Amino acid sequence: MVELLQNLIDGLGRGSIYALLALGVAVVFGVMHLLNFAHGELITVSGYAAFWALEAGWSWTLTVPLVIVVAVLTSLVIERVAFSRVRGADQFTLLLTSFGVHFVVFAMFLLYVSASVKTFPRPGWVTDTYALGSLRVEVFDTVVIVVTLATLSGTTFVLQRTTFGLSLRAAAADFDTARLMGVRSDSVIRGAFALSGLLAGIASVFWLMRAGSTVPSAGIDPMLKGVLAALIGGLGSLRGAVIGGFALGMAEVLLRSRLPDSVASLTEGVVFLLIALLFIFRPQGLVSVDHAERV
Amino acid sequence: MFPDLRRDVLLPVVAGLALFVLFVGAGFLYQGLLGGYERLVTLALIDAILVLGIQIYVGNTGVLSFGHIGFGAVAGYAFALMAISPVEKAKRIANAPFGLADVHLDPWTSMAVAVAVVLVVAVVVGIGLARSGAESGAVSATVITLALLFVTHEVARNRPDLTGGDRAGLSFRIGGTLDSRIPLYVALLGAILTALLYARSRGGRLAIAAREDDLAARAMGVNPLVQQMVALLLSVAVVAVGAGLRVYERGSILPRDFFFNLTLVTLVMLIVGGRRSVSGALLGVGVITAGRELARRMGQDGFEFFGIGLDGAPLDWIFRENLKTVFLGVAMLGFMIWRPSGLLDDWDLDRWLHARLGGWRSRRQDRQGDGRPGLPPDVEPDDTDVLLVDGVSVAFGGFRALDNVSLEVGRTEVVGVIGPNGAGKTTLLNVVTGLVASDAGRVALGDTELTDAPSHQIARRGLVRTFQNLRLFGALTVRENIEVSALVASSTRRHCLPVDVDGLLVAAGLWEVRDRRARELDYGTSRRLELARAAAMAPSFLLLDEPTSGMSDAESLTMVDQVRRMAGLVGAGVMVIDHDLNFITGICDRVTCLDRGQVIASGTPAEVQADPEVQAAYLGTSAAN
């Protein structure tokens, strides 16, 4: 029981970060039908920004806003340079464009920084824990969960109560109709990328604090987590993406602690297998969104 | 008729041989001119086999796969486990399960084992892809293939008892490596011919039709899932051979050898050349291999590479190590943005040869004034089966799109369904053809129950439809569009006379444009082609969804003749949905009027037109005066 509770808290902490990433992926998918394989690059770029700032003597307090701003700007630049040029293209083109962005960013850091790992100091409190009954809870997990819940509430507020949120949801439901109804496609798409960047920026802060390092290929792991969680939730569903993020975090923690040792190292593989099985038996994801085709 | 031996067998073989000679020749030229590139060319030969393997699946089905290199990993390890001598294996994986440590086969038997293993894995993955609803551009299918890549990588890294683990020092050594290029040439030629012949085969045609329009293919009786499975198996078999040769040539295998990097490189090669073309795949391998090598050398030595000794200092910010990775990324991104279908798009050498020879031949025929086939005679219906729709109801949420609708169509009549927008006409057609499931009621053709059967089964039973928004197979020629249905008909509707494709082309007024791609046709011609394609199924009933939508009055009238002629040619009954009253009264024997999901009138066109309820609902009150 205690172990299960412990798993639950760990899973929530991990799942929070995935939920932020997945929501960013889902927001962009909503307006462009683009499954963004380059989403992780926001973490790569902001990771290097954090590395340079911390090396220049900045404190984490200053670095946190920097990371978030860099993530938002990167998201907007990527949209401008690459994705704005393939709007309305077929899935094949969209998927490979985002894959291409991933590789260009990866290659740029390889070219101009180096292939080696850059480490930076993590804030002291990341590894602190406190007792809650018989549980040991990480301060870090607590912060992550609280901040994530606050971010999700804020995002929900924006989506439900602002004109931008309404345009975004309308566009996600039916982009063409939304445009006919006067939703400005340019601004809603850019807004979606900015929001996606903001969510990724917050996730990035936590990701970097925990990792304490970055490499040119650092984006792959968070990208996979975000994309998979969004898919688990059912692409296009914002609520589904958040649920998918928590489900993925929980599944990883449970598998890691419950699987026999001989296969525990295969956790990632097992997670992938489960996800493949999910698509096979429930291709529309956990939260289904109707995409009827007109004939 | 199909297969046209010259177009589908002879020319692909000739083109395949030519491509092989060109590719290998270019390799020799490259290593001869520049010197010291033997290994690079050898590796390009192997890459070409892998890329062709991927092309067979990705190019013909339109499903983007990141997983083929995962299949390659499976094949590579299977090959290595079979081919490495027990002495070598004892050093690395003495405790391998299933007594694998003692197995020792010769390389070619090992290769066969690798192919067999991969085929088994591919059947499982293929069933998964089919279940996930794979179709051209399907995102979930792509993610499943990505999952496959990661799962194989994880397993390879974490089962050192089987794979030796992921450290460089733990690589296998195969006793003796590949020391001749002959096997590579044989495999490459085999891969080229497989890819070309498959694309022109019956299965390849149907897969391409489904790639162009999944829904239309199913409506023509094609089961896309079966065709995708065939493409997948063929494709991974070729990839397995390529992977085995790659391992053999290197003499070692590591988990990272078959992972993200190779996936990127092979995909870039495929999309740069043109994924829908075999020639394109080969061109892509050549261009990317040469380009990447140039980028690597320039990254290393700057302009020194050209031996001119130009001062490259101002460009130092570009000429840096790892330039080749930038090159790959930029190539992928640039092509996706500016030329997503690649250098050659779907141009292929054998098709080009066919068009050339065909053009020359038809000019000669035109001079001699023959070659144009005569009109085929009408066919008497071979049975008297009736299309029966009985009490069908469908609700979307709370909206009753169809409410207890019944109607009958005989083999020799034309029945029209009219009604205002939203009356449920297209929904009725969708229920009859299996695209929408009904909540109640039944659909039957004679004694055959068709209620809620899959779309392609219904088409094979003889109910074939057209679409309101044109759904042609754009990349195929006019003739090939018709052949798709004729192909399906010939294998699933054997009791019917084989459809005379030439005659149909003439009857539909498409003879002159038979070798044009469907996507190049004007609107009216496209409509005629859609009708002819449906007729080529030799259906018992043609179901037409607004065949005159977007046409002028004059064009609508010619459509009346067109529909009559096509239906007469194959002896089919017709059920037609339309708004156009001239058209409906001009062609229909009987008319049924729907309003808000219910039948409000049926009878002869004149009777229905006179019905006050119809006038109120459909024609509007002004028309009643």
Image (cartoon, grey):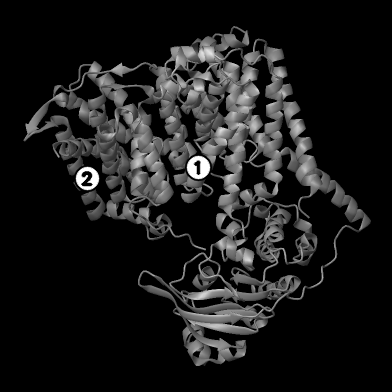
Q: Amino acid at mark 2?
A: Leu
Residue A263 occupies quadrant: top left
Label 1: state its secondary structure.
helix
Nearer the observer: mark 1 or 2; the answer is 1
How busy is the neighbourhood of tag 1: few (under 14 within 10 Å), some, or many (20 plus)? few
Front residue of this view, candidates A111 and B146: B146
Return the mark for residue B124. Answer: 1
Report the chain holding disc 1.
Answer: B
Query: Residue B48, relative to residue B389: is it above or below?
Result: above
Name the spot of residue B559 as percent of width and height, x first: 68, 72
Above or below, B164 relative to B561:
above
Point out the residue furthest to the right here.
Answer: B368
Residue at image mark 2 = A152
Q: Is residue A164 visible?
A: yes
The three-letter code of the residue at mark 1 reads Val
Q: Chain of mark 2?
A: A
The picture places residue A24, in percent across and down from the top left corner, at: 32, 42
Q: Is residue A116 above or below residue B467?
A: above
